[in-house]
Image (cartoon, coloured by chain):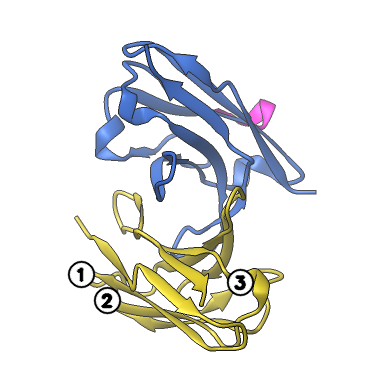
Amino acid sequence: EVQVVESGGGLVQPGGSLRLSCAASGFTFSSHWMSWVRQAPGRGLEWVANIKQDGGETCYVDSVKGRFTISRDNAKNSLYLQMNSLRAEDTAVYYCGRNMIRAYSDAIDTWGQGTMVTVSS
Amino acid sequence: EIVLTQSPATLSLSPGERATLSCRASQSVNNYLAWYQQKPGQVPRLLIYDASNRATGIPARFSGSGSGTDFALTISSLEPEDFAVYYCQFRSSWPPALTFGGGTKVEIK
């Protein structure tokens, strides 16, 4: 079964750091771009970052540039999101997603259950 | 920066009716557009990719159309399980950033 499972969420104070992990299984992890998408409580979906198959290219939404770092370890079938200098507006459920191969839209066809990140004092 | 605008924000319909959701891009996105469904408390599900291709396991009552700046998701006859929020998403050529629209909620009338 193709699946991705996030972990690492929790409560953190403003200015703090958190590292999210995503464990992939059931597919060839190293063949896919991967993404992080977040959803603040009661709000819509917001793409956060993505990373190329070999980790050599990354892309971020402007609001997290310089604070968040996406990375991957293909040997461990794992995706990560290092979040520094966290702000209240980063509070959201964070989803790990697998991007489709051979889709111009880079659509996300596999989603994890999400991990909640709460930034509050 | 390309912006995706979805309309209407809320669509009130009855089971069996046809639903047409709109997604308009501020500039051409070719056919680099996808649609997702999200039910309350659930994870988003991919419905359509590359504007008109149904994802695996998606019923035929869901169809996508359009290219350039104007796109539509049509549900030919609403089933009770189709009442949800729908998002469109596109990918820019370079850098390969993704952008989601604000969503359309399809509610029971």
Contact, CB < 8 Å: mark 2 with mark 1?
Answer: yes
Based on the picture, tell me whether residue A75 belongs to the magenta stretch.
yes
Q: Which residue is mark 2?
A: B69
Please state the horizontal and vertical placement of residue B17, each as a whole percent of the image. 55, 88
Q: In the rendered structure, which disc, 2 or 1, sits on the residue that comes first in sequence?
A: 1
Mark 1, Cα crowd under 10 Å, few <14 / some 14-19 / many 20+, is: few
Q: Which residues are magenta?
A: A72-77
Give the spatial CA distance, label 1 vs label 3: 30 Å
Find residue A55 and report its horizontal and vertical position in percent: 48, 34
Q: Is residue B83 left or right of residue A48?
A: right
- Judging depth in this view, the residue of B62 and B105 nearest the camera is B105
Q: Residues within 10 Å of mark 2 (few under 14, many from 20)?
A: some
Q: Chain of mark 3?
A: B
Task: Using the image, determine if residue A59 lies above or below residue B50.
Answer: above
Colour blue maps to chain: A
Which residue carries the number 3 mark? B82
Q: Secondary structure at mark 2?
A: loop
Residue at 57% from the left image edge and 53% from the top image edge: B40
Q: Is residue A81 in view from this perspective? A: no
